[in-house]
Image (cartoon, grey):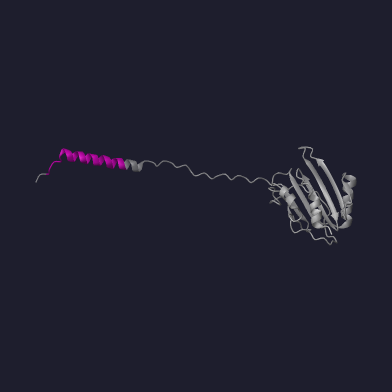
Amino acid sequence: MPARRPTPLARAVTAACAGLIALALTAGCAPEPSVPAATTPTATPAPEVTPPPIAAFPFGQAASTTPLPQDCESILTEEILDSLEGIPLNAPGMGGGIRPDSSRVCVWAHPGAAMTRLVTIVGYAPYNPAMDALNALSTDDGYLCYRPDEGVRCEKAWTDEVLGLPEGRTLYYRDGVLVDTQYANLAPRGYTTAVIQALWPAG
């Protein structure tokens, strides 16, 4: 039988199908849109921590009947601790803790706030070197030294030349133990007296 000629409708359907196939092939060859590479977030550098300066003193082995404190809070009254509320104690990198010579270092300060600090060192100090150091503070540096109770106390206060903030240092030596407090813009009233009374209770 002779082949049947496609009707106009069949030709239209065939053409439409061919167009769809061509469109699909063209779409398959088109380049995909580029995706921006993921960016690595930049880490924020941690603030630099600089320990506060601590004046030297000849700490070392000494004959004493006074035990050193186990921690920094036990030598302060509740009132003084309340006044220090919110101020970090021995924050990392600030130099607090126990030294190789067994002296205790208590640093009350915010890391990075070097001009507001309260540092107390409690440790053993041999009698002759300790007295020589205290005499030098009195004669050479203008410290006021006197003998309250059974110890020797030397103290001096001044004003920072750049920022105009109050600074000072108070030292108390008794029974082979030195309490050395150095402060800047942070000096709770009765602080050194509280430490002395904690180490040597009345009676």
Q: Position of residue 165 (x, y in %)?
A: 77, 39
- Along the line of sight, the residue nearer the viewer: 8 or 66: 66
Q: Residue furthest front?
A: 203
Residue 124 position, x and y percent, is: 82, 58
Please tell me whether residue 170 is drawn above or below residue 66 in the rendered image.
Answer: above
> Where the C terminus falls, by quadrant?
bottom right
* Front residue (pair 182, 148): 148
Residue 109 position in % (x across, y down): 72, 47
Residue 185 appears in which quarter of the rendering? top right
121 w.r.t. 41: above or below: below
Q: Which residues are magenta?
A: 3-24
Residue 108 left/right relative to 138: left
Position of residue 15 relative to residue 51, above or below, is: above
Q: Residue furthest left?
A: 1
Q: Give the image quarter of residue 33.
A: top left
Residue 180 as seen in the image, left or right of residue 114: right
How far from the left and from the top, in percent, is residue 62? 85, 60
